[in-house]
Amino acid sequence: MMTEMSFTKIFHPSQVFVICLQLWMFCTLSPVFTLDNNATLVPKDNNATLVPKDNNAILVPKDNNATLAGLRLAGLRLAGPRPLEQVEIRRGPVGDSAACGAVNKYLFLRIVGGTATKPHEYPWQVLLEILHGRPSSAFNCGGTLIHPRWVLTAAHCVLDYGNTMIMAYLGLHFAALSTDNETTYVSKPAAVHCQKILVKNVVIHKEYSWKTNENDIALLELQVPAVLGEDVRVICLASPRALMLGNMGTVTGYGLNAHGTGEMQDTLRSVELLLVDKDLCRLLYSGVSNAVVGEAMFCAYADGKDACQGDSGGPFVRELSPDRFVQTGVVSYGLGCARPDTPGVYTNVSSYIAWLRDNTARAPLCVC
């Protein structure tokens, strides 16, 4: 695990405190707190407060006489009359496993048949758009941010677009998508508040087979790194131990709400699915041509719920701990959408950790 350390100071006439963050943080702060005789921070007025944003930073006093060493904060937010424009926080983590996979906990956290997510509830979600070679822009697939420069998706999503311009949308919630019954062409997403970054390079697994869907995994290198923050974060990738987390998972995407005649979702949606025994899944697909459920795949199902066209390449995540998720799968294929007794099939991320590291130039990925 690699940790980037950065420091910012809160100045007070009599004391200087240093915030040591296991994050990227860039702040300019004017004094809004005073220090009492017991070396504790008190608001300068009744409306100013310190608000913790997550659990992986520590407020450390500069000298040994203060008594704040145990106070845990992450990011400093001033709540009250002071303007927030002075504070910018880039969260992060390249390789910081304490930050990756964290859902936006301030959203009161606790597809076909799914429910609309709260804005930026899943900040690693990526929407992919094809910009060249079609009459109009085309919504293609989903993906997951696994590093500021790298997006994880399915190989079948980008197999034919190696030399095509692909735009990645990060931090997007409302996509304002539109389709007709004959094509999957869509209007450009209404992405005023998201990051739009062109893809620089497409890396498809060399052993991907479009006939069997095995090794259905690919990487997209972004032209510039994403700026990490509340709306955009990287996901934690599943180590083998993450496969023991239970029997439920969550899929997110903007895909069709029904097979064939469905409409694209204009809001990111999520659905909870139950893991299916692999031998049973193989039996269910045994009569389907070219449908292979290989060792590096798994299956998931829920009655009336499923991923669908347009969700491909998106994440299947499981809860690692409260407010933190790990990606165990990539949406690969299925027979229709939400057919009775027909699970969806997913690429097993933990089987490809070495491949991901080798093909991201040994970038410090977050693996849990």
Image: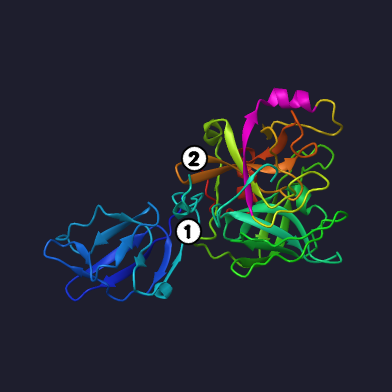
Q: Quadrant of residue 203?
A: bottom right
Magenta-drawn stretch contains 269 = yes
Give the percent coordinates (x, y) of residue 211: 85, 39
Q: CA distance from mark 1 to mark 2?
A: 18 Å
Q: Position of residue 190 (x, y in %)?
A: 67, 67
Q: Amino acid at mark 1?
A: Gly
Q: Label 2 near label 1: C-beta < 8 Å?
A: no
Q: Earlier in the sequence, mark 1 or mark 2?
A: 1
- In the rendered image, is residue 361 in sight? no
Question: Residue furthest toward the left?
Answer: 37
Say whether residue 124 is left or right of residue 96.
right
Q: Which residues are magenta?
A: 268-285
Residue 308 visible, this angle = yes
Residue type at the position of mark 2: Leu
As helix, strand or loop, the secondary structure at mark 2 comes to strand
The residue to which callout 2 is attached is: 320
Name the residue rendered at 58%, 34% in the picture: 248
Residue 7 counted in the magenta span: no
Q: Residue 143: x, y in percent?
A: 66, 52
Name the disc covering residue 301, or none: none
Q: Tag on residue 92?
A: 1
